[in-house]
Image (spheres, grey):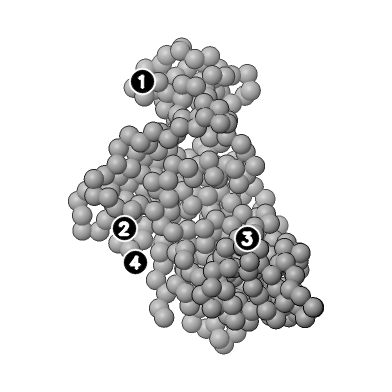
Amino acid sequence: MQFEATLDSLTIQNFKAFSDVKLEGFGAFNLFIGANDAGKTSMLEALFLLTGCSNLGLPITIQNNRGVIVQSFQDLSYFFHGLNVREPVTMVAESKGLGETRELEMRAKGLANRSIANGQKGVVSDGGRISDAYPASSDGLGLSSSISGPFVLEYDAKLHHLGRSEPSRYRAQLRVESRDDIKFDEVEKSSDDVDMTLSARFISAGNNYFAKAISDVVVHKKDKELLKLLEGLNPQITGIASRADMAFVDTGLDRMIPLNMFGSGIVRATNLLSLSILAESKILLIDEVENGLHYEGVVPLLRSLIGLSVAKNIQIFATTQSLAILQGIAHILNEKAFEEARPLVKCYSLVKDKSGTVRSYEYDHAQFEHCISKGIEIR
C-alpha cells in the first residue's frame, strides 16, 4: 500500500511559541524534538486546530489539556505569541493528496469589531484610530480587567479546494463570560455544506485511557493483531477483552485483570496501538510518545507505530525531548523490514534562540546519525 500524506506542510504565525515558522515535507511518521519550552506541544495544537477548522470548541479543549480552565478571554489570550493579541494568529496547512489548503485565522475582537492593542497602555485600536476606552490591566498582560465581557475570539476558517474558485468558509465567535457561560456564535457558514474537519485524535502526555478504542479492536476481531504488537511491551499478556468501559487482559492468572491495573506506560501504549490499528483517524497527534514506558519498551512501541502509520495510511505527529527516541528510530529504520519506510519518517528539531524565536530544522533518515552525533542542539 502506497502511503499518501494527509498534510504536507504547515505555516504558523503569531501562535504561542511561534512568531513565524514553516514546516514542509511531512511523511507518515513525523517527530518533533527539542528542549523544554521549544514549542513541541504547541506544534501539535496548531495541527489539531487546523484539522477541526469548523470546531470552535477546540480552543477550549486545548486549554483544558494544558490544565487551564477557561473562565475569561484572558485564558484564550495565551494562544497569541508573546501575548500580542493585536496581531492575528494565522495557520495554513497544505494537502496535495486531498487537493486542498486549510487556513485558519484567530483574532481578538472587541465591541464594534475593535481589535485589542497589546503592549500600549490603555488603548484599543479601531481601524487605525487609538481610543482610551479601556484601561490597562495590572497583571502585566496589557489586557483589561473586564476583558472577559466585551472581548471575543473571532474564528475565521477557509478550505480552499483545487479547481474551485471559492473556498468553503466558516466564521464564528467564541465569547467567554465565565467558566460556566461560554457561547459559540456562528457568523458565516458556506452553503456548500462541505465538512471542513479531518478526523484526528490528540493524545496528551498524561495517562490516557480510551477503553472504547480497545473494545472496538476486540469487536472488529483485530485483537490478535494488537496482542502481537503488545508482545514486545509485555509478553505476559496473552489475551484481551472488554466489558462496558473497561479493558481486561489475560496474564495467565485464574481470571483476567483490568488493563488499568498496569503501569501508565502499558495503558497508554495499548491505547496508541489500538487507535492506530483501527485507523479511524487520519491523523494521530501524540505528545511525549515515550511517556510512562520503560526504555526497553520504547523501541517496540516506535517500531509498531511506524509500521502501522505506513500500512494503515495514517499520519502520526509525535513529540519528544529525548535524543534516545531518535536513536531508537534510526535503529528501526536500519532494519531491512523498514527499508521502504525510511523516506516516510521525518524529524523536525525545534530550537529557540536567545531572542525567543523558534526555528525548525528538518532531517530525514539519511541525516539521523549526524543529528544524533551532534545532539541536534537539544542539549
Q: For this rendering, which residue is in front, 353 or 243?
A: 243
Q: Point out residue 91 in the picture as x, y percentages from the top left corner.
A: 42, 47
Above or below, 75 relative to 117: below
- Marks 1/3 in contact by CB < 8 Å: the verdict is no
Q: What is the C-alpha distance between the residues marked 1 and 3? A: 48 Å
Q: Nearer the viewer, mark 2 or mark 3?
A: 3
Q: Point out residue 226 in the picture as x, y percentages from the top left corner.
A: 60, 76
What numbered label is drawn on residue 97?
Answer: 4
Q: What is the C-alpha distance between the residues marked 1 and 4? A: 41 Å
**Residue found at x 44% / y 59%:** 199
What numbered label is drawn on residue 100?
Answer: 2
Q: Residues within 10 Å of mark 4 (few under 14, many from 20)?
A: few
Which amino acid, mark 3? Asp
Q: Earlier in the sequence, mark 1 or mark 4?
A: 4
**Residue found at x 52% / y 58%:** 201
Q: Dot 1 corresponds to which residue?
A: 112
Quadrant that contains the N terminus? bottom left
Which amino acid, mark 4? Gly
Q: Residues within 10 Å of mark 2 (few under 14, many from 20)?
A: some
Which amino acid, mark 2? Glu
Quadrant that contains the C terminus? bottom right
**Residue found at x 30% / y 37%:** 188
What numbered label is drawn on residue 245?
Answer: 3
Please state if 243 lies on the left or on the right of 282 as rendered: right
